[in-house]
Structures are given as C-alpha cells and as structure tokens.
Amino acid sequence: MKLIFSILLLLPVFSFGQKDYAKTIIDTLCSDHYKGRGYVDQGDVRAADFIVDELKKIGVQPFKKRSYTQEYDFKVNTFPYPIELVLGDDTLTPGADYLVNPISGTAQGEFDVVEVNKENYKKIFSAINFKQMDPSQTTFAFNFIDCKNEDLLKEVNALSYKATQYFPVLTVTNKKQMYSVGRQQTTYPLITIDSAAYSKVDKAQIKVTNKFIPKYTSKNVIGMIPGKKKRKYVVFSAHYDHLGMMGPDAMFPGANDNASGVAMLLSLAKYYMANKPNYTIVFCFFSGEEAGLLGSKHFVSHPYFRLKKVKFVLNVDIMGGADDGVTLVNSAKQIEAYDRMVAINDKMKLLDKVKKRGQTQNSDHYFFSQMGVPAFFIYSMGSVKNYHDIYDTAENTPLNKFDEVQTLLQEFVKGIK
C-alpha cells in the first residue's frame, strides 16, 4: 500500500515539471527581447536561435549534413518607428485603442478630419475626386458602426482600402480588432480605431512610418530524435513566429499563439529523449506562419526526407488552455486516426472532448496534407480568448490541461503502425 502511494505521489510531480518547463519557455519567448517574434529587429531570428540552443541542451540532433536551420526569403511590411495618433486633445494608445493596418504606408502631420457615415456617404463621395485631393491636409474617418446594410459595409470597406492610395484613412469599429502581417504596402496608412476610444474631431495628428523589406531572411528550425525505425518518421510541428511590433510601444507577445505550441514540442522532445521512440521523431519549428504558412510551405517544397516515409504529422497551435478539450482539424478525412485518438482519451480520461473538424488552410499541417501525408492540426479549446492582440501574454496563458494534451499525443504516437 505504501509503495502504491509513493508511485501515485510521483505522478503530479512529473506533471508539474512538464508544465513548469513549458511556462519558462513561454515566459522567455514572450519577453521584450524577442520583439513579438516578428520582423522588427529580427525578433523571429532571435527566437529561432533560442529554440536551437534549447534543442542542443535537450540533446535533439540536426539532420545529417544539415544545420538546425533552414533559411528562406519573403517580402514583409514592418513598423519599427514610433507611431502616434492624436484625436483632438486625446492621445490614443497603439495596440489598445487602435491598430495600424499591416499593409499601411507612411503619413506624418496634422490633418483635417472628415467623418463619413451612412447618412453623408453618398453625398461626400459623389462630389470628391480622390486624385485631386492634397494628402497632406485631409483624412477621412469612416464611422459605420451603426450600419446594418452588409452590401454598403462591403462597399465602404473596399473604398477605405482604395482611398489609401491617395490619403491616410481612419476607420471606426466596435468589433474585436486582430492584428496580422502585411506582405505588401499601400501609399498611406489605414488605421482602425476602437469605437470606445474614438471621438468626432476636426483635427488629427498622425505619425506612421513603415519599413518595407523586399527580401527578409527567416529560418525554420528542424531537429530529430532517431527511432528504432530510423527511415520512417513522425513529425511534430509548431510555428514559433508571431506578429511582432507595431511601433516600439505595441508588442504582440503571442503566448497562446504560439509560444505554447513551441513549449509543447520542446516538452515532447524531452520526453522522447528519455523514451526511445519506434519511429524517428522530427520536430519542425516553422517561421512565417502568420505571413501565410510560408515556413511550412518552404519545408514541404524542400523536405529533409521523403514525405512518403512520414507516418503522421501532428501540428500543434494554441496550446494555452484545453479546459474544454481539443479540436482535431483534418480529422473528418482521417476517421480511423480520429477514432483512435478519441478511444485513447476516453480510456485515460484526459480531456473533456476531442472534437472533429474538416480540412482548413489555417496552420502548418496544410501543405503536408496537400501532399497526401496524414496530418492533424490540434488546438485547445478553453478559457483563453486573447488572439492576435497585445493581451495574448504569458500571464494570460494558464496552460490548463497542458500535460493531458501531451500525454494524449504521446499515446497516439505509440499506436501508429
């Protein structure tokens, strides 16, 4: 009886160690040094270097005759310089009160503000020739938060983008704002303001300076742990990049999306170093996911091994809290694998739910799947709702059921034939 108690006592200690390690990884990747893991001050490259160092500490190897990193280039729009928006006498807070559209260009100065709404929209734009306007004098504030006409809203949205060829544009929203990555640039900025921070004014001070990088070099990080069957592979993947900086004062930490996924892969790496796998385990830490799945697309086009030798790809993204279980994207076409995952979960009573979902093109499993490789994209469901905003912080990422998700993945891999 005493022996049984001792064994049970050890289980939560091991789990605490996993979660504690994961929290350390997330805290590190979300710190100011990594600049939101975007493209200002090479935040993503800093993160790649950290992951390589961590793999070396764990004992994960690079592939033979290759380094841990796989470089590729893409174009990207960035905002490394101070950003300012003042409406009347109110200085708004970047990231909290407004977002600069990631494809924005540059504008600096004081502008007359013309508010456009559903009442005056037709009258104003029937009388205006954009090309004859002085972009140094006027900005339009599109305020359609009380408009229910979907066709008009689509028309206004298209017009607001078109207008950035000629002058800076403000838009007002009462919906959640989410930042992203821009890979092109307009002439002038497009700034979206939260309705709670907006006030109708005659003058606005705007300061936005973009830096467009036509050839930015990013890195995938690839490591492996040899299995008993060395030429057959199970791939774990997670993107480590996030949205970076919008000026020096607004950082998007990306704790849940996807420092938590990086932490999951590194925790799995520690497990497989201590428990030799049947198949070679490959860890792919992709960059460029937020810019359009660029890292995984590049890897699938330039793989380190024959893709037909891959038994399964398990892509993890958003691992910050599985209070309500997990969703398996692509499981609707992988029914046998899905049923096995559900059976493991039911037997071990790990998570509340393992939800089925069809194919999507929204994470790094996609290009593997397009090549016929069996793949799941797993994300957690729960209380963590911060997404693509400045509030996706380490402090707001509790990692509920993190250990249970890891156990589910490990048990699933054990059963791969």
Image (spheres, grey):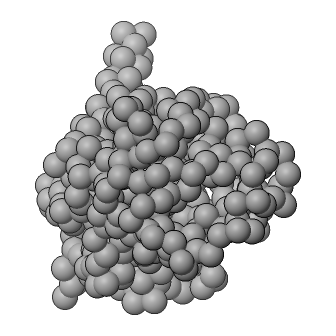
Q: Is residue 291 left or right of residue 331?
A: left
Q: Residue at x 31, y 75 (%)?
A: 212
Farthest residue toward the top?
2
Q: Residue at x 46, y 74 (%)?
A: 186
**Figure label count:** 0
Q: Which quadrant would the C terminus be assigned to in this image?
A: bottom right
Please tell me in which quadrant of the rendered image residue 10 appears: top left
- Tell me where residue 227 appears, x and y as whole percent: 36, 69
- Tell me where residue 230 appears, x and y as whole percent: 36, 78
Please tell me in which quadrant of the rendered image residue 394 appears: top left
State whether residue 193 appears in this view.
yes
Q: Residue at x 35, y 52 (%)?
A: 110
Name the foreground residue: 180 vs 327: 180
Q: Residue at x 22, y 58 (%)?
A: 81
Name the foreground residue: 122 vs 231: 122
- Tell me where residue 285 appears, x and y as whole percent: 35, 65
> In this rendering, is residue 67 above or below 157?
below
State whether residue 236 appears in this view.
no
Name the foreground residue: 208 vs 59: 208
Name the foreground residue: 246 vs 317: 246
- Tell me where residue 120 appears, x and y as whole percent: 75, 52
Q: Which quadrant would the N terminus be assigned to in this image?
A: top left
> In this rendering, is residue 192 above or below 45?
above
